[in-house]
Amino acid sequence: DTAVSQTPKYLVTQMGNDKSIKCEQNLGHDTMYWYKQDSKKFLKIMFSYNNKELIINETVPNRFSPKSPDKAHLNLHINSLELGDSAVYFCASSHNRNTEAFFGQGTRLTVV
Amino acid sequence: SQQGEEDPQALSIQEGENATMNCSYKTSINNLQWYRQNSGRGLVHLILIRSNEREKHSGRLRVTLDTSKKSSSLLITASRAADTASYFCATVMLQGAQKLVFGQGTRLTINP
């Protein structure tokens, strides 16, 4: 039973397309996150949701729109994809801000 | 700006030796966490140490925290080839946004 699962694992798409990445957690956590890992392995938070409410939007272009239909799901939709969006995107969840986070296996997005 | 910085950026040792990685951060924290990332995989939580704790153990892992120096170290004893991975420290700040702020990671290679 995967705790945090995200799909797809790989995504190759052309510039200008719109794509979505889905994330689900079965841990009963209140908080979910999206992180971006660049080619130098640097991890940076993009969004954080608590009980379906957006609490962090870390200066991410508005082409990125997260959606949390319920506490267990946090999806990421990206419009008008650009070459610079190529990265690995990780979904994560935690019980609260002061506990450990559980990460999905990542989605490697390649924009060509 | 990035909260954590890790040292060294890369470490290569022989199997059976001990590996030490260091992490420095800038602001007051609630807790500091260490994660492991195997190549092409998601992050796995290793240890969480709170700001009022100085040392924590988990199996072959030992984490120390010095809040006066704003630094932490991760020691892996009796290293194994399977310990080859990237190791990240992440901090949760005492006040402010609910997020993990990651260092740039240490790439650890254990040579058989």
Image (cartoon, rainbow, N blue to C red):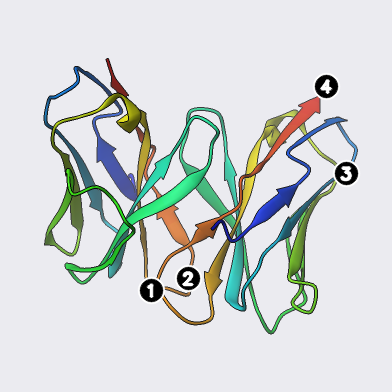
The reply, left or right, for residue A11 in relation to residue B37 is left
Amino acid found under the numbered disc labelled 2:
Thr
Image quadrant in which you'd find residue B58: bottom right
Q: Nearer the viewer, residue B7 or B54?
A: B7
Q: CA distance from mark 1 to mark 2?
A: 6 Å
Label 1 and label 3 in one chain:
no
The residue mark sitting in front, 4 or 2, is 2
C-beta proximity under 8 Å, tags 1 and 2: yes
Residue at mark 3: B18
Q: CA distance from mark 4 to mark 1?
A: 40 Å
Residue B83 sits above or below residue B2 on the image? above
Q: Residue at x 27, y 15 (%)?
A: A112
* The label number, if any, that marks residue B17 in the structure image: none
The reply, left or right, for residue A51 in relation to residue A35 is left
The image position of residue A53, as x and y in percent, is: 18, 70
Amino acid found under the numbered disc labelled 3:
Asn
Disc 2 packing (10 Å; few <14; some 14–19; many ≥20): some
Amino acid found under the numbered disc labelled 1:
Asn
Residue at mark 4: B112
Image quadrant in which you'd find residue A17: top left
Residue at mark 1: A96
